[in-house]
Image: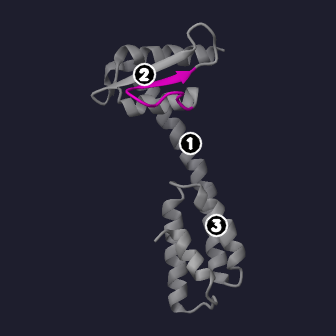
C-alpha cells in the first residue's frame, strides 16, 4: 500500500490522537523523510495532508518539521549534485577511457538537458550552436567510448565559452 493511500484511509476516520495514531503519524513522517529524495510529488501531497489533519497537533508539527527537512535536503542535494558533476568532468579529462556510461549521461543531462533520443544504443543531445548541433554518446560494455567522452568535453568547453 502506498503512503498516500494510507493517509487517504486515515482521513476518513475521526483523528483523535491516541498512542496508536501517534505511532502511525511518527512512522508516516519517517516514511516521508525517506521518500522525499525520490519523489517531489510527496512534497506537494504534504501540503494537502496538512490541511486535512490540522486538528492533530502532532501531525501538523511533523509536517512542518518535514517541510524544513525538505528544504534543507534540497540545498544539500543540489550542492552534492554539482560537486559530483564537477568530479566526473575532471575525471573525464584525466582518463576518457575510464568513464562509466551512466556518469557520462549525468554530465550530458546537466549541460545539454534531456536527451532528444534515448531509444536504442545511442543517446543524442542537442547543443545551442549551429554546425554540429548534436552530441552523440553510446555505451560499450557499460563504459563511455573514449572518443565520445572527448567530444563531450569539447562541447562543454564550447558551451562554457559562449
Q: Residue furthest left?
A: 141
The tag earlier along the polypeptide, 3 or 1, is 3
Give the vertical position of 17 relative to 133 (above or below).
below
Q: In which quarter of the image is residue 103?
A: top left
Dot 3 falls on a residue whose secondary structure is helix
Q: What element carries label 1?
A: helix
Q: Which of marks 1 and 2 is nearer the N terminus?
A: 1
Dot 1 crowding, Cα within 10 Å, few <14, some 14–19, many 20+: few
The residues tagged by marks 3 and 1 sit, at their Cα atoms, a distance apart of: 24 Å
- Classify mark 3: residues with Cα within 10 Å, few (<14), some (14-19) or many (20+): some
Q: In which quarter of the image is the C terminus?
A: top right
Label of residue 46 in the image = 3
Could you tell me which residue is drawn at 54 percent across and 47 percent down?
A: 77
Q: Residues within 10 Å of mark 2 (few under 14, many from 20)?
A: many
Q: Is residue 35 above or below residue 54?
A: above
Q: Which residue is drawn at 52% across and 64% down?
A: 33
Q: In percent of the image, x 35 and y 30: which residue is there? A: 100
- Magenta stretch? 114-126
Residue 142 % position (x, y): 30, 31
Which of these two is toward me, 113 or 69? 113
Contact (CB < 8 A) between labels 3 and 2? Answer: no
Choose mark 1 or mark 2, whichever is in front. Answer: 2
Q: Which mark is residue 137?
A: 2
Residue 73 spot, x, y in % from top left: 57, 54
Q: Distance between the residues labelled 3 and 2?
A: 39 Å
Residue 93 x/y as whole percent: 42, 19
Left or right: where 41 falls relative to 85: right
Q: Is residue 17 above or below residue 34?
A: below
Q: How far apart are marks 1 and 2 (CA)?
A: 26 Å
Nearest to N terminus: mark 3 or mark 2: 3
Amino acid at each position: 500500500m502506498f503512503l498516500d493511500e494510507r493517509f487517504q484511509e486515515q482521513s476518513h476516520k475521526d483523528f483523535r490522537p491516541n498512542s496508536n495514531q501517534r505511532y502511525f503519524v511518527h512512522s508516516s513522517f519517517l516514511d516521508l523523510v525517506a521518500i522525499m529524495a525520490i519523489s517531489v510529488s510527496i512534497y506537494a501531497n504534504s501540503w494537502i495532508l496538512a490541511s486535512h489533519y490540522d486538528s492533530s497537533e502532532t501531525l501538523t508539527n511533523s509536517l512542518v518539521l518535514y517541510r524544513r527537512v525538505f528544504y534543507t535536503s534540497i540545498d544539500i542535494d543540489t550542492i552534492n549534485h554539482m560537486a559530483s558533476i564537477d568530479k566526473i568532468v575532471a575525471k573525464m579529462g584525466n582518463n576518457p577511457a575510464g568513464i562509466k556510461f551512466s556518469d557520462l549521461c549525468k554530465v550530458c543531462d546537466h549541460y545539454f538537458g534531456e536527451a532528444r533520443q534515448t531509444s536504442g544504443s545511442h543517446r543524442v543531445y542537442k547543443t545551442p550552436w549551429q554546425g554540429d548541433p548534436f552530441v552523440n554518446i553510446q555505451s560499450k560494455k557499460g563504459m563511455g567510448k573514449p572518443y565520445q567522452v572527448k567530444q563531450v568535453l569539447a562541447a562543454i568547453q564550447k558551451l562554457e565559452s559562449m
